[in-house]
């Protein structure tokens, strides 16, 4: 496949700790319900899966935030649960309740019946990647993504979102062999899934470990990070001599930062509980850092939004040989006023220049 | 007031890093719904508040787990929301939805109208403390407790439990002056409340910062820890020449461990994301540590429960000049099989002896 040359590579360069003129920014869940135009497309699509499974709609919503804000990257519009859906678990989005699986993995027989899905059943995702990449026409890079083996395992076993993680943790403590079996399959599936996204045109990939942070120390390493590392080890890291950077993000994983940074990724995503300056010291600029504004800060007045952005940029400090990609520490809230996002993007771009020696 | 002499002071000594023959254990929410006898008393009381506000019922349920398991401490049966209830916010327990306030603090006028409650309105709590202490008759020490100023503030502002903390965080970013006003009142109220518990007979106190861990680095210190420190600074630390140890617990606060340890507390409570060995290194035994089994481990088979307890005790290692109180990292689940609690208490008592030089 051949695509248009990239006009803005600030995001990709920052991930690789190369000099850039300013700190790039994108936002987790930037194509989403806080935008009127997203809700309009979503209504036409009829359902969340109708949107995610139709490459034209997925392309449309992926590009929407770029029309409003000068963001430095686009991210594929999709969901981390496409993989277990392709495994035959029966994904449903119940209004007001979030995603649910009709056939969660709750018996030994169900564990043993699980298999890596045929990537042909996920072709709609790869088609969306290619279509978005073409539509972007080189404006900014396109990020592909997947859930971590443990995080999709949570949904596969619990069947829905949970506060206690009782079923998956019971399996972990009671029958660790069964959980390892599931996670090994998830890791294989996720590797194939991300590689197919890369082959379809994704220019960077991010592994979302949304729930690894609920694990006990010691078991996080065994049941989440080890499988993230397996995925990262299996990824295509170059296409046509261009590097494909990998971002690893465990929400609530600050205590394990050094170990995540040693997973083979290029960048570590951080939530807001971890100071950027401290994170930088602990990783000694061996990886780039992505984050970490509290999404709730966007509900404050504009001056406060800008001040909080400056506080984080100051905390990171002079970029030197490090790399910082500004982002939220979690997905943007559906109630966010879009004008606050505009102020944030503007402040990050303007204010960060002072910390870049390559500042234009 | 005079009470019977204490027969088992292992818990109090461990909190003060004095030699003990074995690692003491108690469990957060040990008097609770996982016990049939608790549910029976709760049914007689008619409602949660009917139970909490009646000293006889509160005494009955506080003592129930001690009849089943050789725990090393009792903890007052109550709720962290008694304080805002006494402030006039109108606490209600809606079936299946958890606690709610009828009149949450959501306007500037409501913030300015807030005042430290009259401790006479909380006399039912202090009466329960004295009655429990008498009934205990010196078997084990009695722990008093309160929510941290920030944590009760979450409920006061949100009106109920929340996943996003949007209202309190919006206030924090948008009008920090208003949040500081609330937290200053909460700190004064909490200090008075814990001191009255101590005067009524509590032999140790614990400050539960259940939600401080959702704050951004830098703001946790300003909006939660600073007010916990204010409370701790104002506490009565000795009664009749006997020390009253203080335990500070911020769930999800592992990244701020050194700062919590420097808050003036005797012991820091830990959730399961922080390894005990690592926590010990980081605090250099300047405080005792309390924790930190994942409550979900109690759903595994008995051998696995015992193995997980040993893993944590081994991680803490030879106690030497340190102090370890075994506990969960969060409240026990209502679905926990009581026989697993029995196995846990037994394993901790038996296995830990090897690490105590004063081992009997």
Image: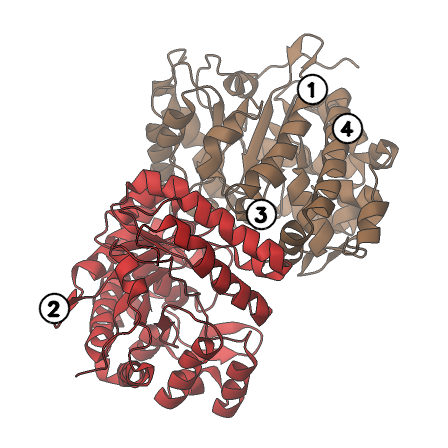
Chain colours: A brown, B red
Question: Which residue is more in the foreground, A34 or B217?
Answer: B217
Q: Subunit of mark 3?
A: A
State the CA–CA distance, disc 2 to disc 1.
77 Å
Residue B110 x, y percent position in the rendering? 31, 70
Camera sees residue B329:
no
Dot 3 crowding, Cα within 10 Å, few <14, some 14–19, many 20+: some
Eye-nearest disc, 2 or 1 = 2
Camera sees residue A97:
yes
Q: Earlier in the sequence, mark 1 or mark 3?
A: 3
Up the image or down, B102 lies above or below A160; here it is below
Residue located beneath label 4 in the image:
A192
Residue located beneath label 2 in the image:
B241
Q: Are marks 2 and 1 in contact (CB under 8 Å)?
A: no
Q: Subunit of mark 4?
A: A
Question: Which residue is more in the foreground, A289 or B283?
Answer: B283
Can you say which quadrant of the picture contains the N terminus of chain B?
Answer: bottom left
Q: Are marks 1 and 3 in contact (CB under 8 Å)?
A: no
- Mark linked to residue A34: 3
Q: For residue B156, what is the image quadrant?
A: bottom left
Q: Earlier in the sequence, mark 4 or mark 1?
A: 1
Q: Are marks 3 and 4 in contact (CB under 8 Å)?
A: no
Question: Which residue is more in the foreground, B128 or A88?
Answer: B128
- Mark linked to residue A4: none
């Amino acid at each position: 496949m051949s695509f248009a040359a990239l006009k803005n590579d600030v995001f990709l360069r920052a991930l690789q700790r190369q000099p850039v003129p300013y700190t790039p920014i994108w936002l987790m869940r930037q194509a989403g319900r806080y935008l009127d135009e997203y809700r309009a497309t979503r209504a036409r699509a009829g359902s969340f899966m109708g949107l995610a499974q139709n490459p034209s709609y997925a392309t449309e919503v992926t590009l929407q935030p770029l029309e409003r804000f000068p963001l430095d990257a686009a991210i594929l519009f999709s969901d981390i649960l496409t993989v277990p859906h392709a495994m035959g678990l029966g994904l449903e989005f119940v209004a007001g309740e979030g995603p649910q699986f009709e056939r969660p993995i709750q018996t030994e027989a169900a564990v043993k019946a699980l298999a890596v899905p045929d990537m042909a059943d996920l072709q709609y995702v790869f088609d969306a990647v290619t279509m978005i990449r073409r539509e972007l026409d080189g404006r900014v890079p396109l990020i592909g993504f997947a859930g971590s083996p443990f995080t999709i395992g949570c949904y596969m076993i619990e069947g829905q979102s949970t506060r206690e993680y009782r079923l998956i943790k019971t399996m972990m403590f009671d029958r660790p062999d069964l959980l390892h079996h599931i996670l090994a399959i998830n890791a294989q599936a996720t590797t194939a899934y991300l590689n197919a996204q890369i082959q379809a045109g994704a220019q960077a990939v991010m592994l979302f470990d949304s729930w690894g942070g609920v694990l006990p120390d010691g078991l996080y390493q065994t049941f989440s990070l080890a499988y993230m590392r397996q995925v990262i080890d299996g990824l295509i890291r170059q296409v046509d001599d261009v590097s494909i950077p990998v971002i690893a993000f465990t929400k609530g994983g600050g205590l394990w930062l050094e170990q995540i940074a040693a997973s083979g990724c290029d960048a570590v995503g951080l939530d807001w509980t971890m100071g950027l300056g401290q994170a930088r010291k602990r990783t000694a600029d061996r990886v780039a850092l992505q984050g970490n504004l509290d999404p709730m800060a966007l509900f404050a007045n504009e001056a406060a939004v800008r001040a909080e952005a400056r506080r984080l940029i100051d905390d990171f400090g002079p970029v030197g040989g490090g790399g910082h990609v500004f982002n939220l520490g979690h997905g943007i809230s559906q109630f966010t006023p879009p004008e606050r996002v505009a102020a944030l993007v503007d402040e990050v771009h303007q204010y960060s220049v002072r910390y870049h020696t390559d500042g234009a």
